[in-house]
Image: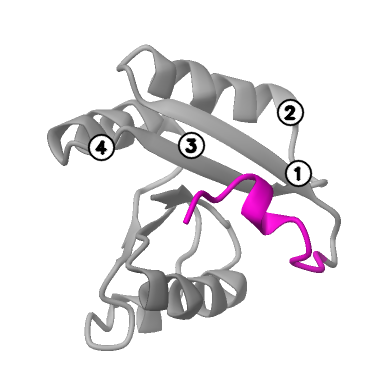
Amino acid sequence: MIVGPISSGVSKTTSLVMNVFGVGLISYASSDPALSDKTKYPLFFRTAGFKSVAPMASLLVELSIQHVSILYSSKYDDEDVDFFKQQFNARQVTADSMKFSESPSGDNVDEVVPL
């Protein structure tokens, strides 16, 4: 399971790629209604904002998901990501994170997304 990205456009692309590998994607900010199309984005999920991280972490536990990867851009604060990781870790869900520049290349995604 991957947490992020926050951009609807990046979520669409990432979700399509991760579908091939059977990896789910949860976004806490992507809002494009097109992402609700379960025939095109069957493994895409979203929550309603930053305060929803605790329920999101609880959902992962309920789904028996033990590891998440958090992908985020450099315009977001590392403290926010640390908060997410603390919430996941408190529920025995391990969390790795990777900060991307505004134009990620994808060359090092395999470091954080175990396939």
Measured as percent of width and height from the top left, residue 14 is found at 54, 71
The residues bearing labels 2 and 3 have C-alpha atoms spaced at a distance of 14 Å
Query: Which disc, if any, is residue 50?
Result: 3
Q: How far is the residue under mark 4 from the one under mark 2?
A: 22 Å
Spatial distance from mark 3 to mark 1, Cα to Cα? 17 Å
Label 4 packing within 10 angstroms: few (<14), some (14-19), many (20+): some
Ranked by sequence position, the earlier of labels 4 and 1 is 4
Q: Secondary structure at mark 2?
A: helix
Residue at image mark 2: 78
The residue pinned by badge 4 equals 60
Q: Nearer the viewer, mark 2 or mark 3?
A: 2
Q: Earlier in the sequence, mark 2 or mark 3?
A: 3
Q: Which mark is residue 99?
A: 1
Cα–Cα gap, marks 4 and 3: 16 Å
How far apart are the alpha carbons under marks 4 and 1?
Answer: 22 Å
Q: Which secondary structure, mark 1?
A: strand
The rendered magenta stretch, by its main secondary structure, is classed as: loop
Spatial separation of the CA atoms under disc 2 and disc 1: 9 Å
Mark 2 and mark 1 in contact? Answer it, CB < 8 Å.
yes
